[in-house]
Image: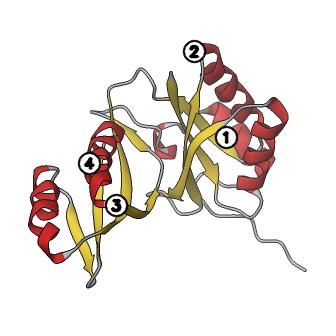
Protein backbone atom coordinates (compact mmCIF):
# COMPACT_ATOMS: atom_id res chain seq x y z
CA UNK A 1 0.00 0.00 0.00
CA UNK A 2 1.19 3.53 -0.76
CA UNK A 3 1.18 6.07 2.07
CA UNK A 4 1.16 9.86 1.63
CA UNK A 5 2.89 11.99 4.26
CA UNK A 6 2.97 15.79 4.07
CA UNK A 7 5.58 17.77 5.98
CA UNK A 8 5.98 21.51 6.32
CA UNK A 9 9.68 22.31 6.56
CA UNK A 10 11.94 25.30 6.89
CA UNK A 11 12.97 26.52 3.43
CA UNK A 12 16.73 26.44 3.98
CA UNK A 13 19.75 24.80 2.38
CA UNK A 14 20.31 21.24 3.55
CA UNK A 15 16.76 20.36 4.63
CA UNK A 16 16.12 18.03 1.71
CA UNK A 17 19.46 16.33 2.34
CA UNK A 18 18.58 15.76 6.01
CA UNK A 19 15.20 14.25 5.05
CA UNK A 20 16.78 12.02 2.39
CA UNK A 21 19.48 10.92 4.86
CA UNK A 22 16.81 9.99 7.39
CA UNK A 23 15.14 7.76 4.79
CA UNK A 24 18.48 6.21 3.83
CA UNK A 25 19.46 5.48 7.45
CA UNK A 26 16.09 3.91 8.25
CA UNK A 27 15.93 1.90 5.03
CA UNK A 28 12.68 3.50 3.82
CA UNK A 29 12.16 3.58 0.08
CA UNK A 30 10.69 6.82 -1.27
CA UNK A 31 8.16 6.10 -4.03
CA UNK A 32 7.91 9.81 -4.83
CA UNK A 33 8.94 13.11 -3.28
CA UNK A 34 7.60 16.51 -4.31
CA UNK A 35 8.80 19.74 -2.73
CA UNK A 36 7.43 23.22 -3.29
CA UNK A 37 6.83 26.58 -1.66
CA UNK A 38 3.72 27.27 0.40
CA UNK A 39 1.53 30.28 1.15
CA UNK A 40 3.93 31.26 3.94
CA UNK A 41 7.34 32.76 3.20
CA UNK A 42 10.21 30.58 4.41
CA UNK A 43 8.17 27.38 4.50
CA UNK A 44 8.18 24.55 1.96
CA UNK A 45 5.89 21.55 1.74
CA UNK A 46 7.21 18.05 1.12
CA UNK A 47 4.78 15.41 -0.07
CA UNK A 48 6.39 12.02 0.42
CA UNK A 49 4.92 8.75 -0.85
CA UNK A 50 6.25 5.52 0.66
CA UNK A 51 5.14 1.97 0.01
CA UNK A 52 4.61 -0.63 2.70
CA UNK A 53 2.35 -1.63 5.57
CA UNK A 54 0.70 0.99 7.82
CA UNK A 55 3.57 0.85 10.33
CA UNK A 56 5.86 2.38 7.67
CA UNK A 57 3.88 5.64 7.44
CA UNK A 58 3.76 5.88 11.24
CA UNK A 59 7.55 5.43 11.42
CA UNK A 60 8.05 8.04 8.67
CA UNK A 61 5.89 10.52 10.59
CA UNK A 62 7.74 9.92 13.86
CA UNK A 63 11.19 10.15 12.29
CA UNK A 64 10.37 13.30 10.30
CA UNK A 65 8.93 14.94 13.41
CA UNK A 66 12.33 14.57 15.12
CA UNK A 67 14.15 16.67 12.51
CA UNK A 68 14.74 20.26 13.66
CA UNK A 69 13.73 21.80 10.30
CA UNK A 70 10.38 19.99 10.18
CA UNK A 71 7.54 22.20 11.41
CA UNK A 72 4.64 19.77 11.17
CA UNK A 73 3.91 16.33 9.71
CA UNK A 74 0.58 14.86 8.66
CA UNK A 75 -0.34 11.47 7.25
CA UNK A 76 -2.82 12.01 4.40
CA UNK A 77 -3.20 8.33 3.46
CA UNK A 78 -6.62 7.81 5.01
CA UNK A 79 -7.74 11.46 4.86
CA UNK A 80 -10.24 12.73 2.30
CA UNK A 81 -7.75 14.62 0.14
CA UNK A 82 -7.17 15.96 -3.35
CA UNK A 83 -4.19 14.03 -4.72
CA UNK A 84 -2.66 14.89 -8.09
CA UNK A 85 0.42 14.22 -10.19
CA UNK A 86 1.72 15.93 -13.34
CA UNK A 87 3.09 13.97 -16.30
CA UNK A 88 4.72 15.04 -19.56
CA UNK A 89 4.68 12.25 -22.15
CA UNK A 90 6.45 12.44 -25.53
CA UNK A 91 4.73 10.18 -28.07
CA UNK A 92 5.95 9.15 -31.50
CA UNK A 93 3.19 10.43 -33.77
CA UNK A 94 3.05 9.90 -37.51
CA UNK A 95 0.64 12.23 -39.33
CA UNK A 96 -1.81 9.37 -39.97
CA UNK A 97 -1.96 8.62 -36.18
CA UNK A 98 -2.41 12.14 -34.85
CA UNK A 99 -6.22 12.17 -34.96
CA UNK A 100 -6.38 8.97 -32.87
CA UNK A 101 -3.88 10.35 -30.37
CA UNK A 102 -5.73 13.69 -30.12
CA UNK A 103 -8.98 11.80 -29.46
CA UNK A 104 -7.28 9.97 -26.56
CA UNK A 105 -5.92 13.26 -25.25
CA UNK A 106 -9.47 14.70 -25.25
CA UNK A 107 -10.95 11.65 -23.51
CA UNK A 108 -8.45 12.00 -20.65
CA UNK A 109 -8.75 15.82 -20.54
CA UNK A 110 -5.04 16.10 -21.20
CA UNK A 111 -3.33 18.74 -23.36
CA UNK A 112 -0.89 18.66 -26.23
CA UNK A 113 1.81 21.17 -25.24
CA UNK A 114 4.30 20.64 -28.07
CA UNK A 115 4.07 19.41 -31.65
CA UNK A 116 6.95 18.39 -33.92
CA UNK A 117 6.94 16.55 -37.27
CA UNK A 118 7.51 13.19 -35.55
CA UNK A 119 6.16 13.57 -32.01
CA UNK A 120 3.68 15.14 -29.60
CA UNK A 121 4.25 16.12 -25.98
CA UNK A 122 1.18 15.53 -23.85
CA UNK A 123 0.59 17.03 -20.41
CA UNK A 124 -1.84 15.61 -17.87
CA UNK A 125 -2.47 16.57 -14.26
CA UNK A 126 -4.60 13.90 -12.61
CA UNK A 127 -4.78 11.10 -10.07
CA UNK A 128 -2.14 8.38 -10.44
CA UNK A 129 -4.66 5.87 -11.82
CA UNK A 130 -5.75 8.27 -14.58
CA UNK A 131 -2.14 8.92 -15.57
CA UNK A 132 -1.48 5.19 -15.67
CA UNK A 133 -4.55 4.63 -17.86
CA UNK A 134 -3.53 7.35 -20.34
CA UNK A 135 -0.02 5.97 -20.49
CA UNK A 136 -1.31 2.45 -21.17
CA UNK A 137 -3.47 3.75 -24.03
CA UNK A 138 -0.56 5.70 -25.52
CA UNK A 139 1.99 2.85 -25.39
CA UNK A 140 0.98 1.35 -28.78
CA UNK A 141 1.98 4.64 -30.47
CA UNK A 142 5.44 4.59 -28.91
CA UNK A 143 6.30 6.43 -25.71
CA UNK A 144 9.62 8.08 -26.48
CA UNK A 145 10.11 9.83 -23.16
CA UNK A 146 8.17 10.53 -19.98
CA UNK A 147 8.51 12.38 -16.68
CA UNK A 148 6.16 12.41 -13.69
CA UNK A 149 6.32 14.80 -10.75
CA UNK A 150 5.18 12.47 -8.01
CA UNK A 151 2.08 13.07 -5.98
CA UNK A 152 1.07 16.22 -4.20
CA UNK A 153 -1.91 16.35 -1.86
CA UNK A 154 -4.08 18.67 0.21
CA UNK A 155 -6.79 17.60 2.64
CA UNK A 156 -10.31 18.51 1.54
CA UNK A 157 -12.48 20.95 3.49
CA UNK A 158 -11.38 22.94 6.50
CA UNK A 159 -8.57 20.56 7.53
CA UNK A 160 -5.11 21.97 6.84
CA UNK A 161 -1.43 21.51 7.62
CA UNK A 162 -0.75 25.25 7.19
CA UNK A 163 1.63 26.78 9.73
CA UNK A 164 -0.85 29.48 10.78
CA UNK A 165 -3.30 26.69 11.74
CA UNK A 166 -0.73 25.04 14.02
CA UNK A 167 0.70 27.96 15.99
CA UNK A 168 0.75 26.20 19.36
CA UNK A 169 3.07 25.98 22.31
CA UNK A 170 4.79 23.08 20.51
CA UNK A 171 5.52 25.26 17.48
CA UNK A 172 6.59 28.17 19.65
CA UNK A 173 9.17 25.79 21.19
CA UNK A 174 10.24 24.77 17.71
CA UNK A 175 10.61 28.37 16.61
CA UNK A 176 12.79 29.25 19.59
CA UNK A 177 15.04 26.22 18.95
CA UNK A 178 15.41 26.78 15.21
CA UNK A 179 15.62 30.54 15.34
CA UNK A 180 12.57 30.89 13.10
CA UNK A 181 9.97 33.37 14.25
CA UNK A 182 6.29 32.45 13.88
CA UNK A 183 5.82 35.12 11.22
CA UNK A 184 8.47 33.42 9.08
CA UNK A 185 11.42 35.77 9.57
CA UNK A 186 14.86 34.54 10.49
CA UNK A 187 16.59 36.45 13.27
CA UNK A 188 19.18 39.02 12.28
CA UNK A 189 22.73 37.83 12.81
CA UNK A 190 25.54 40.38 12.62
CA UNK A 191 28.81 39.27 11.07
Q: Nearer the viewer, residue 39 or 19?
A: 19
- Residue located beneath label 2 in the image: 54
Secondary element type, mark 3: loop
Pointer 4 residue: 134
Residue corresponding to mark 3:
142
Q: Residue at point 16% right, 58% down?
A: 105
Q: Is residue 8 visible?
A: yes
- 149 and 170: which is toward the camera: 149
Which residue is under mark 1?
172
Mark 4 secondary-structure assignment: helix
Distance Cα–Cα, label 4 vs label 1: 46 Å
Q: CA distance from mark 2 to mark 1?
A: 30 Å
Helix, strand or loop status at disc 1: helix
CA separation in Å, label 3 and label 1? 54 Å
Determine whether label 4 and label 3 are within 8 Å by CB.
no
Residue 7 at x, y percent in the picture: 58, 41
Amino acid sequence: MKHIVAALVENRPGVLNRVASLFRRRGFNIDSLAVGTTEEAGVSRMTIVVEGDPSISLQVERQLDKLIDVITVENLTDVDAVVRELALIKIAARPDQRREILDLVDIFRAQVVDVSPSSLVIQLTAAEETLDALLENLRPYGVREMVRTGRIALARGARTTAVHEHESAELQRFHSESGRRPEGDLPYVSE
